[in-house]
Amino acid sequence: MKMKAIVQDTYGSADVLHLEEIERPSIKNDEVLVEVRAAGLDRGTWHLMAGKPYLIRIMGFGFRAPKQPISGLDLSGTVVAVGSDVSRFSVGDEVFGAGKGSFAEYAVAREDNLVNKPLGLTFEQAAVVPVSGTTAIQGLRDVGQIEDGQSVLIIGASGGVGTFAVQIAKSYGAQVTGVCSTSKVDLVRSLGADDVVDYTHEDFADGVHKYDLILDIGGNSSLSRLRRALTRTGTLVIVGGEDGGNWTGGIGRQLRAFVMSLFLRQRLTSFISKASGADLESLIPLIDAGDVTPIIDKTYPLAEAPTAMNEMVEGRVRGKVAVTI
């Protein structure tokens, strides 16, 4: 059977994305076929579209062209088929999670990367949670080891991961400061941040304020600058990084942080988030309690996914973007 999908035949800008009618995907024994109602957009989808940094091509995502030609990771929708080894889901279940090629009418996901959609979320809201929400909770809880009463700085607080991170950190009882641009200060305050630093007018590393935990989301600050904002035994968690060249991206800064941390009382670390149904499940009580709410700036129909990508890349998005199918 045929379906509509956003596909790409080569790496490049959003111009390589185009709507096409292709065969509906088949599933393996441990996989689920989802009729997609909405898909989320994140920086990981951009990296896989652009093929940058080049290191991801060497890591097996396709050297000259993407092995997975259909774009999209986040999804929400309805189960239409399950593999023979799948026991947690049945046809008709409403689910959300991380899948393969979610910018399409149908997408495949592993059973352990899906969970049941909360009744209180729309499909669009659910679709923007998986990648960004799990990245935020992994960075704060697992890597950052956040504790009640800590002073936490979120750099990139108005973005996809950042809007979740501010809310999650508050739910842990932290005193949260968010860093963002002028036009997004009101958004970050509305998420519950105790203080907001407008980086166009203020310096979070002024030496006056010190933080127990810094979550640096896609930032480009030097390690020395970030250390000035840390307490003597504080923790820095680097999430991604968009500078550093086409070959390694922000990985060079992450490696330097690891080496420096061996000789310091401060803990400088980083991580690469992984899709996890268990971590996604841990967010549901926070969502149900109203402590975490997905922030959607704009929604686009499937055919306009390239426009949505450009909006995100150019920094015009407050929170998340959803693609409706």
Image (cartoon, helix red, strand yellow):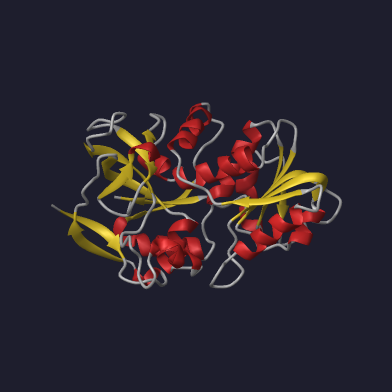
Query: Where is residue 141, by image quadrant?
Result: top right
Q: Where does the image place residue 89, in percent across and percent down from the top left?
A: 29, 31
Which residue sits at x=29%, y=63%? 7
Task: Provide residue 278's location: percent of width, then percent of height.
Answer: 46, 34
Location of residue 247 (image quadrant):
bottom right
Q: Residue furthest right?
A: 208
**Which residue is painted at 43% across and 68% down in the image?**
50
Nearer to the camera, 140 or 63? 63
Q: Quadrant of residue 121?
A: top left
Q: Nearer the viewer, residue 322 or 50?
A: 50
Residue 85 position within the rendered picture, expressed as x and y whole percent measured from the top left = 26, 34
Answer yes or no: is residue 204 visible: no
Name which residue lies at 57% across and 44% down.
136
What is the count of numbered marks? 0
123 in relation to 250, above or below: above
Query: In the figure, 86 relative to 24: above or below?
Result: above
Determine whether 134 is above or below 52 in the image.
above
Res 10 visible: yes
Left or right of residue 15: residue 279? right
Residue at image coords 50%, 47%:
132
Depth check, front residue: 94 or 260:
260
Locate residue 276, reporting x and y percent: 45, 40
